[in-house]
Image (tube, grey):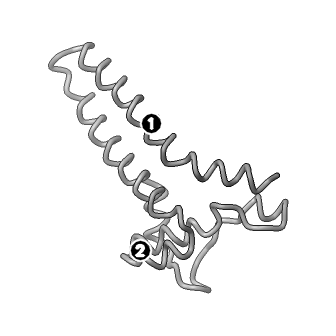
Amino acid sequence: MLIILYAVVNSPEEGEYYAVKCVHEAVLGEPCPSCGMSRAFSLIVRGRVDEARLMNSHSTVLFLFFSLQLLIRAAVSALLMVKRRGRSLFRVVLLSDIAVSSVMALITFYPLVRLMILSMS
């Protein structure tokens, strides 16, 4: 939720944007595969998806991941508050959430992590 809120609050326009400093770029002197992601998220929130893809090609997939996770967190929280079926429902919901979120994270972040590792070698 904070990532999406950060994107909503910050304007993607040059000079009006408070950018998160890239540690990779500060240490190695070159941008990493995730550089421009914050500004790209701000563009996506404003409906400027094509510009966001130009800023960072991974931005739309990662933004979709975080948005879906926000919805999943809300749905899981709502399901876990309903205690009609007791512990068995809790266990099924929790294990399903772990499985689905883990697979989503692996699919979403694998290309980005792979590029980051390759850029360091």
Locate residue 4: give its quadrant.
Answer: bottom left
Q: With respect to residue 64, does 29 lie above or below? A: below
Q: CA distance from mark 1 to mark 2?
A: 25 Å
Name the element at disc 2. helix
User: Residue at point 34% right, 27% down?
Assistant: 96
Q: Amino acid at mark 1?
A: Val
Q: In this orientation, which residue lies closer to the viewer: 17 or 28?
A: 28
User: Residue at point 48% right, 44% down?
Assistant: 107
Is the residue under label 2 in contact with that under label 1 (CB below 8 Å)? no
Q: Position of residue 39 (x, y in %)?
A: 55, 72
User: Residue at point 67% right, 54% down?
Assistant: 115
**In the image as oriented, which residue stretches furthest toward the left?**
84
Query: Are there few (<14), some (14-19), or many (20+) residues within 10 Å of tag 2?
Result: some
Q: Earlier in the sequence, mark 1 or mark 2?
A: 2
Q: Amino acid at mark 2?
A: Val
Q: With respect to residue 26, does 43 lie above or below? A: below
Q: In this orientation, which residue lies closer to the viewer: 83 or 102?
A: 102
Locate residue 20: give its quadrant.
Answer: bottom right
Q: With respect to residue 104, does 17 lie above or below? A: below
Residue under pointer 2: 49
Q: Position of residue 56 (x, y in %)?
A: 56, 69
Residue under pointer 1: 103
Q: With respect to residue 117, does 36 lie above or below? A: below
Name the element at disc 1. helix
Circle number at residue 80: none
Left or right, residue 31 beside residue 8: right
Q: Position of residue 93 (x, y in %)?
A: 29, 25
Q: Position of residue 65 (x, y in %)?
A: 42, 51
Left or right, residue 59 beside residue 86: right
User: Residue at point 40% right, 29% down?
Assistant: 99
Q: In this orientation, which residue lies closer to the viewer: 10 or 64?
A: 64
